[in-house]
Amino acid sequence: MRVENRKNSDEQRRESLPKPWTLGDFEIGKPLGRGKFGKVYLAREIKSKYVVALKVIFQQKLDKYRHYNQLRREMEIQSSLHHPNVLRLFGWFRDGDRMVLILEYAHRGELYKLLRKFGHLSEKQAATYILSLTQALAYCHEKHVIHRDIKPENLLLDFEGRLKIADFGWSVQSRSKRTTMCGTLDYLAPEMIEKKAHDYAVDNWTLASSEGFFQETLATKDHRASLDRDECDPSGTCNDE
């Protein structure tokens, strides 16, 4: 009887363990965007009907650009952050030759597209977004997380218009200064341009200039060059460990 009870207890514990995710757990919808390493799709978890965004990253791209450490760091950092103005990373799983990230769905998309549509924001809108960004960055910095690539394309809006910081691909969690030159050229802080060691102040620099890019007219983004993640500094090193 005691052996049988232990067997039943073990089976109950196994059943209570979270089941690994697969693509079969989701209804896949329209594509939301694409990047250097893969694509993002609208999706709905079949059981709960919860709507999410799935970021699908291809193994071939990870191999080509040796992106493993950077992706692992991105997943660890973003999944640990819980703030109303930071896009949630709920989890991730491997599906064949693809890595899939389960992200919060930001219904209204990039702030950049809003800027392109209307040319500029009202003073009230800009103030609201700047306050949200300030609070989110303060939260990240308290946890020693530096985003290092704040720009309109990486600021998303949810269904209610709430701002969300996204894309932690260049982020790092550290108490010490870093030396990797990374981010988007138009928004680089002076210490990065001068190839000096930097800390969370590089995010503050972008925040201080955010009033400008919230108000400016954006006809095209062709002039805004982003540093490729396999060409992040003159030495060719992009894994800022």
Image: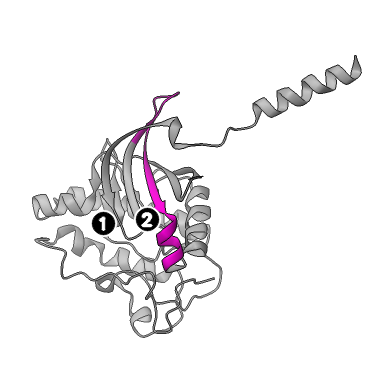
Helix, strand or loop for disc 1: helix
Residue 67: x and y in percent read: 46, 64
Q: How many marks?
A: 2
Mark 1 to mark 2: distance in Å? 9 Å
Q: Is residue 85 visible?
A: no
User: In the figure, residue 103 lies in which quadrant?
Assistant: top left
Residue drawn 46% across the image and 50% down it: 97
Residue drawn 25% across the image and 40% down it: 161
Helix, strand or loop for disc 2: loop
Q: Is residue 83 left or right of residue 218?
A: right
Which of these two is toward me, 57 or 171?
A: 57
Q: How many C-alpha atoms fall within 10 Å of the one at disc 1: few (<14), some, or many (≥20)?
A: some
Q: Is residue 188 left or right of residue 19?
A: left
Query: Is 52 part of what is drawn in magenta?
Result: yes
Residue drawn 16% across the image and 70% down it: 223
Q: Return the residue at label 1.
A: 153
Instruction: Please tell me which of labels 1 and 2 falls first in the chain.
Output: 1
Which of these two is toward me, 67 or 108?
A: 67
**Quadrant containing the C terminus in the rendered view:** bottom right
In magenta, the rendered stretch is 43-64
Q: Are marks 1 and 2 in contact (CB under 8 Å)?
A: yes
User: In the figure, residue 229 lies in which quadrant?
Assistant: bottom left
Q: Amino acid at mark 2?
A: Asp
Q: Amino acid at mark 1?
A: Glu
Q: Return the residue at label 2.
A: 167
Residue 164: x and y in percent read: 34, 48
Q: Is residue 6 left or right of residue 215?
A: right
Residue 208: x and y in percent read: 29, 66
